[in-house]
Amino acid sequence: MNKNSIYRQLFFFVIGIAAVSLIVGAVGYARGKNNEQLATRVRELEGQLNAKGIITETAASTGPAEELRTENTELRKEKKQPEKNVAQAAEKPAEQSKPTGPAQVIAIGGSGQEATTQPNWVPPATGATPTSTPTPIPTVTIKIQHLGTFTPEVQAGDTALSVLRRAGVQNGFPVRTTQYWFGEFVDCIGDLCFDDHHYWAFYFNGQYSNVGASAQSIVVGDTSEWKWESF
C-alpha cells in the first residue's frame, strides 16, 4: 500500500466523520429549535390562561399535557357555572315570595282605608253580590166603605173579625162590637156606628156572608168587604 492510498482513505474517513457530525448537529439543532418553539408556545398559552384566571402558577408548572387537561376542566366548570347561577336566580324569587313575619298593613289611597295582608290570604271574588229574596208576608184583603182597602197580615186561626181588628190597630180606626148569643156583632168601624137605619153588612169573597165575622175563618188570598147599608 503506497502513501497516496493511505492519504486517500484518511481523507474519506475524515470527510465521513465530518458528514456524520454535521448530520448529528443538524438533527440536534432541529430538535432544539422545535423544543424552543414548543416551549415558547406553551409559555404564550400559559400567559393567556393566566390572564383569564383559568389556571394557577402551580397548574402551569405541571407541564403542557396537564395544562391542557386543566384548561378543559376549567372550561367545563365555566360552562356549568352560568347554568348554576341561572338556577339560583330562579330559586331566589320563590324564596323571596314566601311570607315571613306577621301580617302587614298596607294603606290604600288617601282615604285612610287600610287592607290587611295575611299569609295565604285570598282576596274575595268580585262581582254581583247575591241578594236574598225576602219571604212574602201572608196577607188578606179588607175593603171598608168610606175608609179604603187594607191588607193586614193573616195568621193561623184568624177570623174575618180578628183581621178587621188588626187592620184597625195598624191604620188607626176603631172597631167596636157587641157580643150576642149567636156571636159578635160589629157595631162601629171608624166613625160610622150601627143605628136604626144603617148597619155594617159583611161580604166574604164577593158573597154576602151567612155567618158572622167572628165565625168566618180566613186564609191567605181571601177578601172580606164591609159595606155601610140601610135597612
Image (cartoon, rainbow, N blue to C red):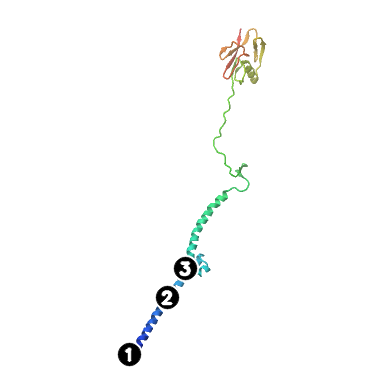
Q: Which residue is mark 2?
A: 31
- Dot 1 alpha-carbon crowd within 10 angstroms: few under 14, some 14 to 19, many 20 or more: few
For the residues bearing labels 2 and 1, Cβ distance under 8 angstroms: no
Percent from the top left, x then y, of residue 166?
64, 19
Q: Is residue 76 above or below residue 179?
A: below
Type of amino acid under label 1: Ser
Q: Secondary structure at mark 1?
A: helix
The residue beneath circle 1 is 5
- Helix, strand, or loop for circle 2? helix
Examine the rendering and report whether any part of residue 34 can be seen. yes
The amino acid pointed to by label 3 is Ala
Q: Which residue is mark 3?
A: 65
Q: Nearer the viewer, residue 12 or 108?
A: 12
Residue 193 in sight from this viewpoint: no
The kind of residue tagged 2 is Arg
Name the foreground residue: 13 vs 201. Answer: 13
Q: Earlier in the sequence, mark 3 or mark 2?
A: 2
Where is residue 33 shown, x and y percent of the image? 43, 75
Q: For the point 57% across and 50% down, which residue is it? A: 96
Pointer 3 or 1: first along the chain: 1
